[in-house]
Amino acid sequence: MTDISGIGRSVLETARDEQRTALTEAEAKGLLAERGLSVPDHETVDSPEAAVEAAEEIGYPVVAKVSAPSVQHKSEWGGGVGVAVGLENPESVRTAAADIFDAANGAGIDASVLVEEGADLEAGLEVIVGGTRDPSFGPTVLVGLGGITVEVLQDTSHRIAPVSTAEAVEMTRELEASPLFDGYRGSPAVDREAVAEAIVAVGDVLDEHESIREIEINPLLAESDRAVALDALVSLDDD
Amino acid sequence: MSVSDLFNPDGIAVVGASATPGKIGYEAMQNVIEFDGPVYPVNPSASGSVFDREFVSAVTEIDGDVDLALCCVPAPVVPDVIEECGEADIGGAVIFAGGFGEAGPEGQELQDRLVDAATEGDVALLGPNTSGFLVPEEQLYATFATDIDTIPSGNVAVVAQSGGLAYAIAFQAENEGVGVSAMVGLGNRANVGFEEAIEYFDTDPKTDSIILHVEGTDDGRGLLETCQRVETPVVAYNVGEQDVGDFAESHTGALTGEYELYEAGFAQYGVPTVRSSTELLDAGTALASSPRPDGPNVGVVTAQAGPGIAITDRLKAAGATLPSLTEETQEIVEEILPGITFSANPVDTGRPMPEFGEVVDAVARDENVDIVLVYELYEGGLGYPTDDLEGLVDDVDKPIVFASGGPREIITEELAELEAIGIPTFTAPERAADAVSALVQYAKRNAEPDAVVAGEEVSADD
């Protein structure tokens, strides 16, 4: 356990020393993976050729994303080249990575490319798991259905953190969308407990690291036997 | 800082007392002379007397035992008055004036000066920006509001963030013939906030439940921890559901509103929550006058089907369980009333009848039942089964809640007899159902962790 929070602390210390307001996606996923969360296989690279090599190693399809501390809304960045999904072959990986490096050069920022195992969104349920440090309540956590559902219906469940796994399971049951976790129209039931463990992890990380302001895993893809953090953002205190 | 100087004083000074009717220094004097203890009007520019009490020029000049000062003076002079209170060893003060923290940076500066003076002099402050507090049993009316001596004494403490809402609840209690042990409007909470008030009323022998109106505090977690720590049951009415942020930054930030956190937090920390001031008062009354419920299982007995169905519907929506009655209970009920309309749960006797009380007794003694809810329209010549139910609450050590309808003139008195034997009463089916729902929430939210895991709601392996 000491080792794990030690790793967390060093990533956070580095970010703080560089006066950053957020971890990169790879750092955020690393922090959560240390807590037992599943994350897609990934590699951070610095050239289109290295991106292709990483893709060959990970296996197609892959996703290529811009990786830079200053870029948080990756899909809107660089005129839309910040995130490329469903890359099936070396050529498409090379092109996507080159586009990201070009846009970064144009914007005058130092960026890398995150090459990541592609996910089959059809294979699970997209969930959002988040946590924020509230000025009045301290660490808090939430769970909701991902995608636009969370914006439109605001179907979320909240707790003051830290929470137990049983409490986190109860949170998922409080959602109007809870029956979807149990499978519908022939789709398999998803691993509710894995979602709960993601909630627990988010609450614990917030509780242990005062320098973290907010954590958002969106989406967390809940599959039949696990839940995978497809995107993760860790925001740090400004001061 | 001693909050008991504030809420339980031996003597009172009214600073800014006035002999001019309509001024708050006059109204406060008029209220506070009802108190059974010395009262001193303080005003450096007044002479003679008001309500037969000699004006004193300053709190430091009072020759007598004073713990509480009611500050009826304008905001700018309040910090100086509190400094003098500290010098005079007055440990509590109520500050009616507005124009402090709620009024921008200048007001905040004034409030900071006030808090410094209070810290220096060890003075517990109610307010600023409050309409004060009442302790009806002591005839202690620390307020400038009028006609508050009509509010009866009881065993529910009202602690409201807003003084206006505190009075709204207290007068509603008066209208319903229910009493309060205290009514407090916290106002700006300069150094006495929810935590201090809850801790004080937890130790108050007159108080058996504490009801909260919450708009938002700087230390929500501290409030929750206090609610969990105290022995006295607490119920909360949390306002602000419609405050929702935008999604510009992140979903997590936008979706995590104060309202959601209070609702979730109160649930986590064992506090039932309600959706209106009426529900708040009803829940507080039910908790204050009943044994603590052991679980969420409600036995419903009704003399009329319709109200019973409405009650059952509402209870289920609120998460109550309506368990099957034991075979033994069903046999007893069928023996009392052969061919009864419905002898499961709810038990529907079809109409009021002389044996109605025996049916309630049987259901209350059922081991599957934690709480009993009874509905019976008033029927002249039959009355309520008060004699049959006497001693039953203590005997079974479970809450029994009774609802009815009938002519106000008749049932007010008859329902009071039920109240006197420990059965809270309501005059609408839904209000009784909501009060019982709060009891159910209290039981569920304070259940031992093992019991929660073993219950229906949480089952980790499916």
Image (tube, helix red, strand yellow):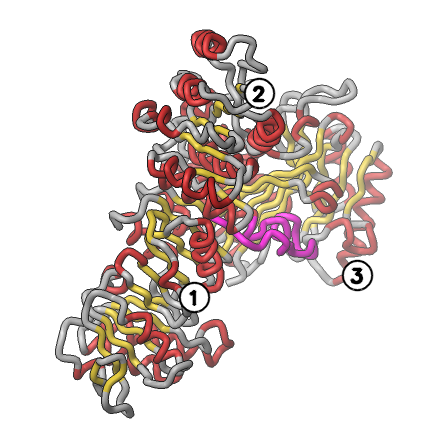
Q: Point out the image quarter for the N terminus of chain B.
A: bottom left
Q: Chain of mark 2?
A: B
Do the residues under discs 3 and 1 have CB atoms within 8 angstroms?
no
Q: Which amino acid is tagged 1? A: Gly
The answer to the question of whether label 2 and label 1 lie on touching residues, with beta carbons closer than 8 A, is no
Q: Position of residue B261 (x, y in %)?
A: 53, 47
Question: Marks 2/1: CA distance?
Answer: 50 Å
The residue that appears at 44% across and 35% down in the rendered structure is: B439
Residue B147: x %, y % from top left: 40, 66
Q: Which mark is residue B350?
A: 2
- The magenta stretch spans residue B353: no
The numbered dot on residue A106 is 3
Q: Considering only vertical position in the picture, is A222 above or below A11?
A: above
Tag 1 secondary structure: loop
Query: Does the image show residue B23?
Result: yes
* Residue that mark 1 sits on: B187
- Mark 3 and mark 1: Cα distance apart in space: 56 Å
Which image quarter holds the C terminus of chain B? top right
Both marks 3 and 1 on one chain: no
**What is the quadrant of residue B130 in the picture?**
bottom left
User: At x 48% / y 14%, what residue is drawn?
Assistant: B325
The local secondary structure at tag 2 comes to loop
Residue B5 sits in quarter:
bottom left
- Dividing the picture into quadrants, the one containing residue A44 is top right
